[in-house]
Image (cartoon, rainbow, N blue to C red):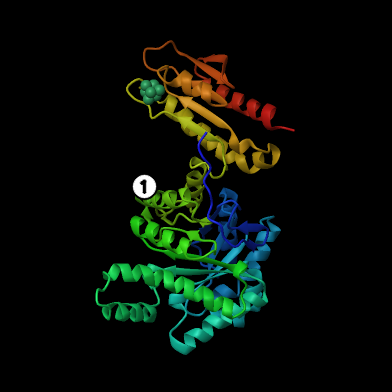
Amino acid sequence: MSKPVVRRSTHQVQIDHLNVGSDAPVLVQSMTNTDTADAVGTAEQVKQLADAGSEMVRITVNSPEAAAKVAEIRSRLNDMGCNTPLVGDFHFNGERLLQEFPDCARALSKYRINPGNVGKGAKGDEKFAYMIRTAAEHNKAVRIGVNWGSLDQSLAKRMMDANLALAEPQPPEVVMKEALIVSALESAQKARDLGLPENKIILSCKVSAVQDLIEVYRDLGSRCRYPLHLGLTEAGMGSKGIVASSAALAVLLQEGIGDTIRISLTPEPGASRTQEVVVAQELLQTMGLRSFTPLVTACPGCGRTTSTVFQELARDIQHYLRTQMPVWRLQYPGVENLNVAVMGCVVNGPGESKLADIGISLPGTGETPVAPVYVDGERAVTLKGDNMAAEFLALVENYVAANYGE
Ligand code: SF4
């Protein structure tokens, strides 16, 4: 039995029906890429992301046309039975939009404010204050989201100048990382001075390099008790984005740092936005932090699996389990903890199948064309013929009904 991860102790922030921080589960977030002014399209994408498992969804609120539709998006989601909290992403003109569209201010569950994009000097302070006071008035949480690509330049200059005045200046990249953290902490303090309670504040400091992200969050986490939202910004496409995000976030999560996560993937043109949600869930589940969907243990295959039956069955089972989950979650409590094994031959097949709740060891090249199925560690039945895949799916379904049904 591995040792459980000890989570960093934080203030706990409530966002609608969800708790964020300390011992509350690490939550999965995502963000739409629709034009928020398109209320129908945005509500549909939020629903897709929520159905895939996103527990909060951020939408950009960048124009009067977008802000005007936020309340409608909320109401459409409610009509679809989707209560996933909506987070409004504000840059440059957030105070104006919140002022002109009070329905938007009320409909959102949380505001994301980027201190680097609020504005400079007294004008910027006023705009920040307006947004914070609006959040406090409506009892909304705020994420102060600092980003390497839009760091508050006046703060960066002030810290660089102070560094140059030192007898032994730090390398510029060290000062810049410190500036990210100072920006988040100073903005949080300003928000508290303006009347936003500490249990309404979440912080993030996103950068795009793995080692920098780990360093920044370790430091930030040791200097405050706000919950932290983790994400490697601009992680990239495909396997590069998945590997880079997982590498960075896994190290931090293992140290108990991180209360919400987003895997920021650049989708392939036309690909579903839900991939980032699936990756975030799989990261948390494979680390043993949460359970979302039954896990499929499958071997990589080798020269002993020359037919495609094995790969097809592993793919079909994975797909089947994931698509069943919206219904199964309600019908079969605890089914997300199910372990299924799909193995390619007799070398490791029986061993791994016995360790799973239900597993199949398919026949490799040159083996007798039969597939023993193991249930709760015991050989239960042997499948043969061309219909093994469908028969195994039926056995999985029966196992779920018998073990998780009421
Ligand atoms: Fe190859 Fe068999 Fe090992 Fe799968 S279990 S990788 S098919 S030897």
Q: Which residue is drawn at the image coordinates 27% and 78% (left, top)?
A: 166
**133 or 270, which lies in front?**
133
Q: Is residue 16 left or right of residue 204?
A: right
Q: Quadrant of residue 206?
A: bottom left
Q: Residue furthest front?
A: 167
| Quadrant in which the C terminus appears | top right
Can you say whether 16 is above or below 290 in the image?
below
Query: Tag 1, which secondary structure?
Result: helix
Q: Which residue is drawn at the image coordinates 65% and 26% (left, top)?
A: 398
Report the amino acid beneath label 1.
Ser
Q: For mark 1, what is the residue? A: 239
**150 or 33, which lies in front?**
150
Residue 114 visible in this rendered orientation of the protein: no
x%, y% of residue 400? 64, 30
x%, y% of residue 301? 37, 26
Q: Residue furthest left?
A: 168
x%, y% of residue 75? 68, 65
Can you say whether 238 is above or below 140 in the image?
above
Q: Which residue is drawn at the image coordinates 56% and 49% (left, top)?
A: 52
Q: Quadrant of residue 132?
A: bottom right
Q: Which residue is drawn at the image coordinates 26% and 79% (left, top)?
A: 164
